[in-house]
Image: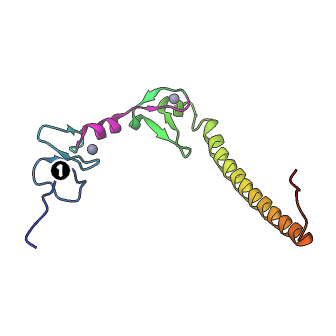
Amino acid sequence: MSERPVQQGAGRGAFPAPAGTACAGCSVQLAPGQGRPQADGRVFCESCHHRRHRLRTCAACGAAVPRQECHRNRYGEYICRACQAAGVKRTLRGPLRKNAKRVALRVLNALIFTALGLLAVRFVLSALRQWDTPVAPAHSDR
Ligand SMILES: [Zn+2]
Ligand SMILES: [Zn+2]
């Protein structure tokens, strides 16, 4: 009962950090001297820092812009400030992609129901045939 498991640094945010700091993004333990201090005082690990400062690609003009300099519309597209100022709120692909997903789902549903229907029809037909000719020699082997 007095035995306690030794906690390793690999755990994720389940225990308070006794020494050093934890990444504010993924709460991985950072050794002293490690980590990237941000402008707002928080410390991120390398990967979170890069994820945070990774440039987005404007869906309209293709320019690489930081996250703060662009707007994410409801289609999940990033539109840069310049394009926003030019009146671009989305690209044609955004709603198309959304509709395409809906159409694909509908087609998939139709396919599944058609397959189920065909299976049912085949089952009924074979049952009827067996019931119709109970002792028919289907194929004589030659
Ligand atoms: Zn992190
Ligand atoms: Zn743009």
Instruction: Locate residue 20, reporting x and y percent.
Output: 12, 47
Circle 1: element type: loop
Of 49 and 31, nearer the camera is 31
Q: Which residue is under mark 1?
A: 9
User: Magenta includes 55?
Assistant: yes
Residue type indicated by callout 1 = Gly
Q: Quadrant of residue 134?
A: bottom right
The colour style of the image is rainbow
Q: Residue, x 88% and y 50% (percent of image)?
A: 142
User: Magenta includes 132?
Assistant: no
Asked if 106 appears above or below 67 in the picture, the reply is below
* Label 1 lies in ligand 1 vicinity (Cβ under 8 Å): no
Instruction: Locate residue 121, reporting x and y percent.
Output: 82, 63
Asked if 135 appears above or below 45 in the picture, the reply is below
What quarter of the picture does the N terminus occupy?
A: bottom left
Q: Residue, x 25% and y 48% (percent of image)?
A: 24
Crowding at dot 1, Cα within 10 Å, few <14 / some 14-19 / many 20+, comes out as: few
Asked if 35 appears above or below 21 in the picture, the reply is above
Left or right of 123 in this view: 137: right
Of 82 and 124, nearer the camera is 124
Pick out the residue farthest to the front: 142
The number of numbered badges drawn on the structure is 1
Left or right of 117 in this view: 48: left
Instruction: Locate residue 105, reporting x and y percent.
Output: 66, 52
Left or right of 134 in this view: 45: left
Left or right of 61 in this view: 107: right
Q: Residue, x 86% and y 53% (percent of image)?
A: 141
Instruction: Locate residue 17, reporting x and y percent.
Output: 15, 54
Q: Which residues are magenta?
A: 44-60
Of 92 and 140, nearer the camera is 140
